[in-house]
Image (tube, rainbow, N blue to C red):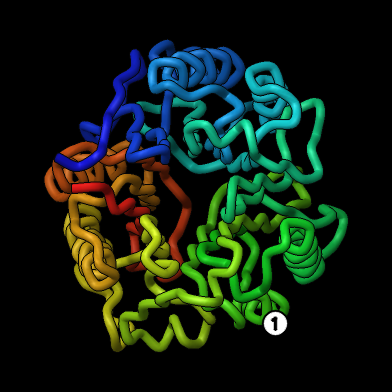
Amino acid sequence: MPDRKIYSSATPLPVGAPAAVRVGNRFFTSGIVSDRIGGLESESHRVFQLLAELLRSSGLSTDDVARTRVWHTRAENIDAEAVLRSVHGVVFNHPGPALSVVEVASLPGEAAVSVELEGVAGGGANARRYESDFDSSSSLAVQVGQELWTSGLRGDPATDKATQVKQAVEDASGLMNQAGIGSGDIVSTRHFMRHDVQFEPDPPEWLAFKEDSIPTSAGIAVSGVGKPGHVFTLELEAVADAHLGRTNLRTGRSFEIDHNYCRAVRVGDGDVIYVAGTTSIIPGEIVQHPSEVGPQVEDTLEITKWAITELGGEWRDLVQARTYVVGGSVELNEAISALEQFLPSGGVASTIVGVPVLGRPEVVVEIEAKAVIARR
């Protein structure tokens, strides 16, 4: 049997997903929402209470959490990010995990907040945390062993988009330098952009940042990434010395080459396979099943499955899927039904969020994934 354990929680979960999956010492939660609907502040307290209980039942402490990612919908007359960071600061010890807060268009069940965690059991004892914030009990980067996770890095909201991208990239490079990680060691990136700001073509600093490593990438248009002036936030994962032995897998799409990223990455014979934000687009830049949610989920998961198996894994090694869907409750429910049908059995930590747009108008689904090759 695979070395995989799944955990349940009181929270209602879409996709038939477990609340959390642990493979060896690696730990992932689904997007956890409250079982008590009551608005952003009330739900955020309940969600973090559920997460604390989930960590305890899984044999982890809050110190073992490397990353927290918080999704929320718009809250009237409330500084949503300030509330969420404050609640995070109560739950986690200082200094705490990397933290990203992103505003999205919709969440399953019309929830106001969804939170996902990633951690390493026992990793808290030896973790190194960089540039920590006391009020939110978070750090701009967390290093456990050879691996580094960053928070969502943002520039000055008073500046233009090009400057914000440049500042975020400079911050990422500075954090990597502190951790002893080189430019060829980045394995996975994702950036969230405010949907009403045009980012084509890619800023040169962003392309140059990825050039030495050709990591996986996801670029997601969302409703907000911080204060009103913020338009861009960047996260990354890196593995020290990955440049000495890594496999970058491409699909043959010209888009991957033009934008300095690949479909999936595996470092040496390591246990993790990182899969980029993937859509139903195939070589030739052809969109399969334009504007159809369910069929695009199926097509996207087929490409994801191919990538995992090409890098030496099996479909059952999939442990985490993060699904972005254009639309509201109807479209989210359609995606949930398709995920229930096409995700592998055995338990996959799953997060689903609604976004305003994805790249091209006919693309309505994008999925990021991570596989962990377990003992057989």
| Residue 238 horizontal side relative to residue 363, left or right | right
CA neighbours of label 1 inside 10 A, class few (<14), some (14 to 19), many (20+): few
What residue would you read off at disc 1?
Answer: 204
| Residue 93 horizontal side relative to residue 39, left or right | right
Residue 291 seen by the camera: yes
Residue 164 seen by the camera: no
* Front in this rendered view, residue 98 or 40: 98
Residue 112, position as x, y percentages in the image: 50, 26
Element on which disc 1 rests: helix
Residue 228, position as x, y percentages in the image: 75, 46
| Residue 100 horizontal side relative to residue 160, left or right | left
Q: Residue at x 35, y 35 (%)?
A: 22
Residue 326, position as x, y percentages in the image: 38, 52
Q: Residue at x 51, y 63 (%)?
A: 188
Name which quarter of the figure residue 194 lies in.
bottom right
Q: Residue at x 45, y 74 (%)?
A: 246
Residue 262, position as x, y percentages in the image: 43, 76
Quadrant for the N terminus in the image: top left
Q: Residue at x 61, y 53 (%)?
A: 148
Name which quarter of the figure residue 235 lies in.
bottom right
* Front in this rendered view, residue 371 or 101: 371
**Mark 1 is on which residue type?**
Pro
In the picture shown, does residue 313 fall above or below 84?
A: below
